[in-house]
Image (cartoon, helix red, strand yellow):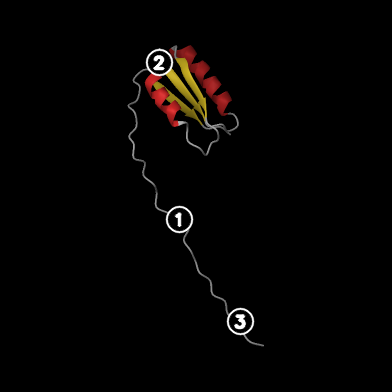
Amino acid sequence: MAKRTSSYRLIDPTTQPITASFSFAPRLLDLRGKRIGLIDDSKANAKELLDDLAALLEDRFETTVALYHRKPSASKPADPEMVERMARECDGAIVAVGD
């Protein structure tokens, strides 16, 4: 019987990190009376988390929820038009990741 040999090719599946080409908005110095935008990532419990957080912010800082957006799925980005609208109409935005 002939001896069988096998060869294997090893592939490294890692990639280089992708650096975002944007800068963060300045932090709000105070939340009192601010208009807040909420972005729900559509995972389980994200809406409940945002609802509770909105109630807490309204109670403690008299904020108002100006806009609410639910993404179609956690793996997809928020609608760019909604992000632009939040930038125009809100003082700040909060994104909730559920589960």
The x and y percentages for residue 83 are 42, 28
Q: Residue at x 52, y 39 (%)?
A: 75
Q: How much space separates mark 2 and mark 3, taking CA atoms? A: 73 Å
Q: Which residue is mark 1?
A: 14
Give the camera-side residue of 79 and 53: 79
Say which element carries label 3: loop
Identify the disc placed on residue 67.
none
Q: Is residue 10 left or right of residue 48?
A: left
Say which element carries label 2: loop
Q: How much space separates mark 1 and mark 3, taking CA atoms? A: 32 Å
The earlier-in-sequence mark between 1 and 3 is: 3
Q: How much space separates mark 1 and mark 2, taking CA atoms? A: 43 Å
The earlier-in-sequence mark between 1 and 2 is: 1
Q: Residue at x 34, y 25 (%)?
A: 27
Give the camera-side residue of 88 and 92: 88
Give the camera-side residue of 73 and 94: 73
| Residue 91 seen in render | no
Q: Residue at x 47, y 29 (%)?
A: 95
Type of amino acid under label 1: Thr
Say which element carries label 1: loop
Q: Residues within 10 Å of mark 3 (few under 14, many from 20)?
A: few
Type of amino acid under label 3: Arg
Q: Which residue is mark 2?
A: 34
